[in-house]
Image: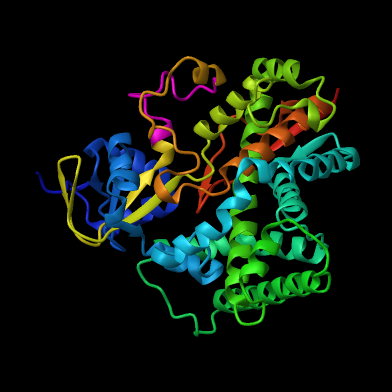
Amino acid sequence: MIDLPKAFPQNRSIKNLKKFQSNPLLYMKEAAKWGSPVDLNLPMGDFVLISDPEQAQFILATNHQNYKKSRGYKEVARVLGQGLLTAEGDFWHKQRKLLQPSFHKPELKKLLPTVWETTRSYIESYQQDEIRLDTEMNGLTLTVLLNSLIKYQDEELKSAMSRNIEFAQEFIVDRIRSPLKWPLWLPTPTHQRYHRMMKESNELIQKCVDSRKAIAEEDVNDILSVLMDHLDPKDEFGQIRDELLTFLVAGHETSALAMTWTLHLLAHYPEVQDKLYQEVKDMDQLEAMDMMNFSNLQYLHRVVMESMRFYPPIWNIVRQAKQPDEVGGVRIEVGKQLMINIYQLHHNSDYWSDPETFRPERFEEGELKHKFQYLPFGAGPRFCIGNNFAMFEIMILLTQFVKIFRFSPITPEKVEFNPLLTLRPKEEVRVVAERR
């Protein structure tokens, strides 16, 4: 067993900080030249880069008991509270067990007509000849989530969530990446906006709960009903709020980015778009789609998988060592924060042929050499609970968009990233949308 090597050993850690903060993906890509695991040599924490699938499997699955959510999740919890994303231990197990049945495929199948109709309505009402994907997909997927998983159609809630999510991500990531974290009681403009956001979120979720209580006699099958059946809306409102915020923020953001990046790629790869159109062109109703087995959606499924390989919405997972460990023959000390870089795993040329090319066919050619080289929804016990819903949602949206529109690019193919908690674009992403 060897000691943990350091990236950029010739530099003091404070010198590396500016480069990391300006472009963490590029910094990690260069740091990987020193191997995996490797200390990222930063001043604000014991961050260790993991870019090897075998090591990722060891941390997330084989020896997951020795790893907990990183310190950064304390900052996430300032916004999302103790929902499924941030909770730990027995409390997390209890909540996961409570919510898991709602995400089994037979239950999700009941929600798909709402996803189809919400998308159809959006497309019918859209009158422009170009789409700014990063904003339009954000609004659409939030509406889908409100209409299906929570069945609460309220423009005020939709508008407030859209307005606050971007600020929340920047607020969380700024605190994670900053070596100095000012207490939130200091009345800075950022802290004041944070407190306004949290107050507004509380009020809106309370309105959502009160609205459901007013129709208590109706049989509504959704996540909110499950929560209110098992948690007292008066005494345990905080937990209901945390779970709903987690689903609204994390659930719609990843789907919005998956749609943004997929349509951007299709605009730049017309041969892929044409092949996909041939598969979906006659699917005029949801019933025409085999959503449970994908028997008549095989190319669509590969397109989504390849898009999430190329641009993984969740680009990084961080775990903190509870006890000393050995990973890849390297000594890992207590407290080290291991950053499993999904983007690098998805672009690792040791596992993928020509990884910088968008090629859905790779998923029928046996390129998966290691089950942890591809982690669009994470892995291990903390595997994303909403993976099936997200995949169904994205496939329904794509089917309807590609069936109706032919996309061509406006934004150049290479887009700079703004990697916060998710892999966001730094600039606008636009496409021409010509009705077929």
Magenta span has 98?
Answer: no
Most foreground residue, 112 or 378: 112
Q: Which residues are magenta?
A: 345-359
Q: Quadrant of residue 256?
A: top right
Res. 390 in view: yes
Q: Position of residue 8 (x, y in %)?
A: 23, 46
- Is 214 situated above or below 105? below
Most foreground residue, 99 or 395: 99
In the image, taking residue 158 as reference, residue 436 lies left or right, namely right
Give the colour scheme of this rendering.
Answer: rainbow
Q: Position of residue 91 (x, y in %)?
A: 45, 67
Residue shown at 86%/22% (left/top)? 436
Q: Position of residue 100 (x, y in %)?
A: 56, 52
Q: Residue furthest left?
A: 1
Most foreground residue, 15 or 405: 405
Q: Position of residue 208 (x, y in %)?
A: 75, 69
In the image, taking residue 258 as reference, residue 54 lies left or right, namely left
In the image, taking residue 321 as reference, residue 260 lies left or right, namely right
Res. 337 in view: no
Q: Quadrant of residue 112?
A: top right
Main SS class of the magenta portion in the image: loop
Q: Quadrant of residue 324?
A: bottom left
Quadrant where the N terminus sits is: top left
Count up the numbered dots. Answer: 0
Residue shown at 66%/15% (left/top)? 271
